[in-house]
Structures are given as structure tokens and as C-alpha cells.
Image (spheres, rainbow, N blue to C red):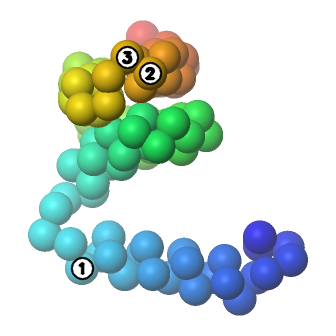
Amino acid sequence: MNKNRRNVFKAYQDFTATIKKGSSIDSKNQSLILIACSILSQCDMCISLHVQNAASNGATKDEIIDAALLAVAMGGSPKMMHMKYVYEEIDKLYD
């Protein structure tokens, strides 16, 4: 989208940045919420990105796993299959 529809992509980025900046929820907790949303959306790339963001915003390994498991609790076993991507990122980010 950035290449072919730069104006649309930029507007989307500005929209999400405005939501995040004006939020009463801190960056770490925003990232944890977005992990859960990514699991529910079954977006592998989103899961990886938001796990990385959560880690860089100070989330612990357990906080990341717990956020992901809340999504599994809401979405059932099909969402559990996407925990694979959470654990892959955790293995890269934490010793």
C-alpha cells in the first residue's frame, strides 16, 4: 500500500498514531491488547509485530503469554493454533 496508495497508507498510519497518542492506556498495555486482537484476527505478521512491540515497551514474557491466552480463551481452539507465532517471537526476544 505504501508504494501504490501512499496517501491511503499515510492516513491509516496517522489515524492509528492519533488513537495511540491520545489514549489513557500506556504503550505496554496497548501492545498487550494488540497481541490479543492479533490472535483473534489470526494475523501471523501482526502477532509477531505486536509481540516485538510489547517486548520493546517493557512487557515481560509472562505478560505477553497471558495476553495471548486471553484471546485463546475468547476465541477457542482455532486461536490456540496461533500461539505458535507468539512463542516463536518470545524465543527470539527473551533468553
What's under tag 3, amino acid-wise?
A: Ser
Residue plotted at (58% across, 85% down):
11
Q: Quadrant of residue 66?
A: top left
Q: Categorize mark 3 by other alpha carbons within 10 Å: few (<14), some (14-19), many (20+).
A: few
Residue 31 location in percent, x, y? 33, 48
Q: Are marks 1 and 2 in contact (CB under 8 Å)?
A: no
Q: Which mark is residue 62?
A: none
Q: Is residue 72 above or below residue 10?
A: above
Q: Quadrant of residue 59?
A: top left
Q: Are marks 3 and 2 in contact (CB under 8 Å)?
A: yes
SS of the residue at dot 3?
helix
Residue 79 location in percent, x, y? 41, 25
SS of the residue at dot 2?
helix
| Distance from the alpha carbon under mark 3 to that under mark 2 | 4 Å
Residue plotted at (45% across, 81% down):
15
Q: Which residue is mark 3?
A: 77
Q: Which residue is mark 1?
A: 22
Residue 80 location in percent, x, y? 40, 18
| Distance from the alpha carbon under mark 1 to that under mark 2 | 33 Å
What's under tag 2, amino acid-wise?
A: Pro
Residue plotted at (13% across, 69% down):
24
Q: Is residue 36 above or below residue 2?
A: above
Q: Quadrant of residue 77?
A: top left
Q: In the depicted view, which residue is nearer to us: 72 or 26?
A: 72
SS of the residue at dot 1?
loop
Q: Which mark is residue 78?
A: 2
Q: In the depicted view, which residue is nearer to us: 54 or 65?
A: 65
